[in-house]
Amino acid sequence: MPEQEQAVTAERSHRKVREGLVVSDKMVSTVVVLVREQKPHPLYKKVVRHTTRFKAHDATGDCHVGDRVRIVETRPISREKRWYVERILEKAK
């Protein structure tokens, strides 16, 4: 059995992973996660901040506004949901 477990983790290793802040939990089993990134501009090399909002599947309903979470890319769950909450990194205070 351990060989099968390794195969599953090897298959899933290529999925995108992001960390962000939950900004909305008003939907059923869905949270909106704000991901902030800093990238250098390709030509001018100035560091530019980007923010992106992802809708992520929260099956347990444990996420609330202000939580830091890790989300992982998955198959399309609905029209806009292509991510799911892997785990909560830090609860809101």
Image (cartoon, rainbow, N blue to C red):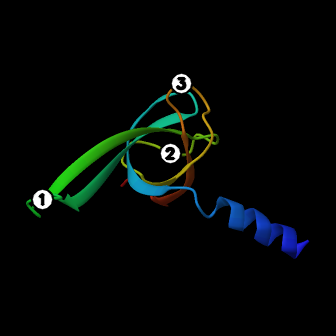
Q: Is residue 93 above or below residue 7?
A: above
Residue 91 visible to an observer of this rendering? no
Q: For residue 18, which quarter of the picture? A: bottom left
Q: Taking 80 as reference, is 6 left or right?
A: right
Label 2, on which residue? 63
Mark whose residue sits in front, 3 or 1: 1
- State the mark number for residue 43: 1
Q: What's the residue at 35%, 39% (across, down)?
A: 53
Q: Which residue is mark 3?
A: 79
Res. 15 visible in picture: yes
Are discs 1 and 2 less than 8 Å apart at CB?
A: no
Quadrant for the N terminus, please. bottom right
Q: Nearer the viewer, residue 7 or 52?
A: 7
Describe the element under mark 2 as helix, strand or loop.
Answer: loop
Quarter occupied by residue 2:
bottom right
Q: Amino acid at mark 2?
A: Cys
x%, y% of residue 85? Answer: 55, 49
| Picture residue at 42% right of the left edge, 40% below the top | 54
The furthest residue to the front: 43
Q: Nearer the viewer, residue 7 or 67?
A: 7
